[in-house]
Each structure stands twice: as structure tokens, then as C-alpha cells.
Image (cartoon, rainbow, N blue to C red):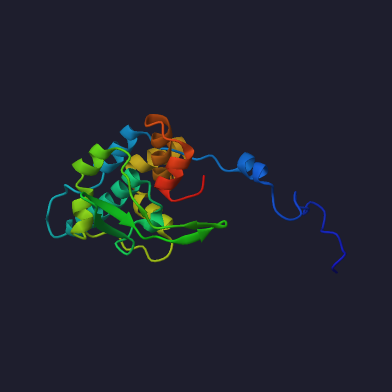
Amino acid sequence: KEWTPPPKNQLKNYIGSESSQEKVETAPQTIVIEDSDLLELINSLPIDVDKDQKKHRLRDRAMEWDLAIKLSIVYGLRPSEVSHKYLEIKNNEKEFIWSSYCKNVDSHKIKPRRLWPIHPKWEKKWHLIKRIKNKDPLPRMKFDAAGSFKNYLRFNQVWKRLKAQHDVVPYSFRHSYSKRAHQTYKLSASKVAGLMGHSI
């Protein structure tokens, strides 16, 4: 059995692991979302629904996801980082948000880091530091955080259009941060890697 070759059409391209160059060439395309579409998505959340008994829960959930999406956009967070378990306020002459999220990924350890906003005006306009400081509610995401994002957004008309046009995914918020950091603010790969908590 050990020496029997695999059945026809079941041969793999590699024995062992791919080279780093091959990984880069075959990596899936990262989909980004333009600023105008991000703002349209946020404005589409049902926060301003009538405050009657039936719609109260709908509005509360929208407020939770409003904060989660804004944090993802402004700081380039992974879906699994969007939690009060990992986010806290620190002060070094000025208040800022700190992520204590740690994980080992492909021989690279994700370390706790200060979060830097890619459009500082959005951080200020949306009162993100204050909302984290006040522990404003965030959605409960038990296991699959990206799946929770998908599940909430699947009926949103703006998200459905972006999905149909560009095949966006929850990680697109993070990819969009990276694109703005490189193309709009002209930051180096090493600088952006440090901001986002990953390897170059």
C-alpha cells in the first residue's frame, strides 16, 4: 500500500510544500472596497429605524455592527480582533486603542500592537476611542468571526451589490486598509506590516 501510486487524476503538483515564490504567484487576489462604497455601506445600516418595540432589536444589532465595521475599516482589524476581549484604551500623552490579540500564523507570531487609524478624520468623526472606552456593545462572535460578518451582511443591499460586482469578503475591510496605507499614504511594506500586525 505504501508504494502504490495514487489513482489517475489524483496526483498532486507538489511533494512537500510549495516554494515561497509559488505561494505568491498562486495567492488569491485580495479584494478591496473603495472609500465611497465603505461609507455607503455604513450609511445603509438600519440605525435610524423607528424606535418602536418591534424595531428596537434591529436597531441595537445595527449599532453593534456599525462599531464592528468601523473598527475594521479604520484600523484594518481581522474579524477575530473585533472584540472588547482584545481592544482597550491606553494613554501616552494621548489616548489610543491597543490590540492585545496574539496568534501564531505561518511561523510568524502576531504580537499586541497600538492601532493606528488610516483616515484619522474617521476615527475622530466616529468617536471610536470613546466608544471603546465606554465599552459600547460589539456583536457576539463565538467561533467564526468572519462568518458572523458574512451572516449579518448577507441581506444588506449595498453588501449584496459589492459581492456581486467585486466578490468582497469580510477581510476586504482589512485589505482596503492596506491599500490606502500603501497607495494613499505611501507607507512602506515594513511600516504597514507593523501597523497591521503581520509579516511583510
Residue at x 16%, y 47% (from the top left corner): 48
Of the pair 101 and 56, the residue shown nearer to us: 101
Looking at the picture, tell me which residue is in the foreground, 52 or 103. 103
Specify the quadrant that holds the N terminus: bottom right
Q: Across the whole image, how many numbered discs are drawn on residues?
A: 0
Q: Position of residue 152 (x, y in %)?
A: 34, 54
Identify which residue is drawn at 31% across, 43% down: 117
Residue extending farthest to the front is 93
Residue 23 coordinates in the image, percent (x, y)? 63, 45
Which residue is at a point 41% across and 35% down the rendered structure image?
Answer: 187
> Is residue 92 left or right of 83 when viewed as pictured?
left
Which of the 4 quarters of the picture holds residue 191? top left
Where residue 88 sits in the image (x, y, percent)? Answer: 27, 59
**Residue 183 in picture, x, y percent from top left:** 42, 30
User: Residue placed farthest to the bottom in the image?
Assistant: 1
Instruction: Using the rendered image of the protein, determine whether residue 168 is visible from the camera's viewpoint.
Output: no
Indicate whether 128 appears above or below 125. below
Name the outermost residue toward the right.
3
Residue nearest the viewer, comparing 196 with 122:
196
Viewer-proximal residue among 178 and 163:
178
Measuring 79% from the left and 51% from the top, which residue is drawn there? Answer: 9
Can residue 62 be seen here? The reply is yes
User: Is 87 placed above or below 122 here?
Assistant: below
